Amino acid sequence: MPVATKSTKSKSRTNGSEPTLERLGPSGGQEVLIQPPRFESAQFRIVGIAPYCQARFSQKAMQAIREQHEAGQRARKGKAREPRNFEEDYKQAMHVSTEGWVGIPASAFRNALISACRLVGFKMTLAKLSLFVAPDGFDAVDGTPLVKIEGEPEMSVMPVRNATGVLDLRARPMWRQWAANLVISWDSDQFSLTDVVNLLSRTGLQVGIGEGRPDSRESHGLGWGLFSIESATKISSPSAFALPPDIDESTG
């Protein structure tokens, strides 16, 4: 079995001498005990209790920025402003998977769970290392992990202010009725199933996801992106975090 070592300074060390290595293990008098990760998983059926609005940074906008960078100083000279296509903006604001369905970034739920830890006094730095949301697929453009959303979107055109303070219009998809199935895995040394259920419940009622959520960094939100838990089903063996069945500790 591999034994960890650490570098120590000898009291009789002279100039140019190398630090000694102290064996960490039963023979060295100091034993390192690191328990293997113990993850548990459950599937949660959530149902929206407020509209969910999405605002993906469009591929068209990214291409325009790239062209400006490639053109350099000539980018703003003599370039006519193209007519606005709100229907195209609406479609570009969706996260579409490689399989063609629309989804919510898995990170939206994970970030919301971590943020909800502030409500219960749990360290967010530990939550970042202990809570994970499994994706159903990936964005066809940039590979963002996605959770499939159930429901029919509609176009929402609302006024917004750009970073410069200029008033503008944004066309975004909105789901007035929506649902999703979340598979959440957690470190059972940090959370129990009951903890995760209650944390997700607070996330849905107090934090929210997407545009206009109560926990928005830009404003106090519009009360959008809220949800409730319809059901929770424990998953016996979380494959995403399973360790190899047999580990040969004699090699290292």
Image (cartoon, rainbow, N blue to C red):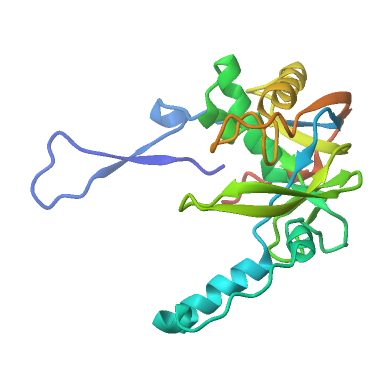
Image-quadrant location for residue 35: top right
The total of numbered circles placed on residues is: 0
For the point 73% across and 62% down, the residue is 89
For the point 66% across and 70% down, the residue is 60
55 or 32: nearer the viewer: 55
Left or right? Give the position of 142 relative to 52: left
Residue 24 percent across, percent down from the top left: 42, 34
183 or 93: nearer the viewer: 93
Image-quadrant location for residue 204: top right
Picture quarter with the N terminus? top right
Residue 47 percent across, percent down from the top left: 87, 31
Instruction: Look at the image and tell me whether residue 246 can be seen.
Output: no
125 or 213: nearer the viewer: 213
For the point 51% across and 31% down, the residue is 125
Left or right? Give the position of 75 relative to 168: left
Residue 27 percent across, percent down from the top left: 43, 30
Left or right? Give the position of 220 relative to 147: left
User: In this view, which residue lies farthest toward the left?
Assistant: 15
Instruction: Look at the image and tell me whether residue 186 can be seen.
Output: yes
- Determine whether 222 is above or below 61 in the image: above
- Determine whether 20 is above or below 125 in the image: below
Residue 43 percent across, percent down from the top left: 85, 33
For the point 72% across and 66% down, the residue is 141
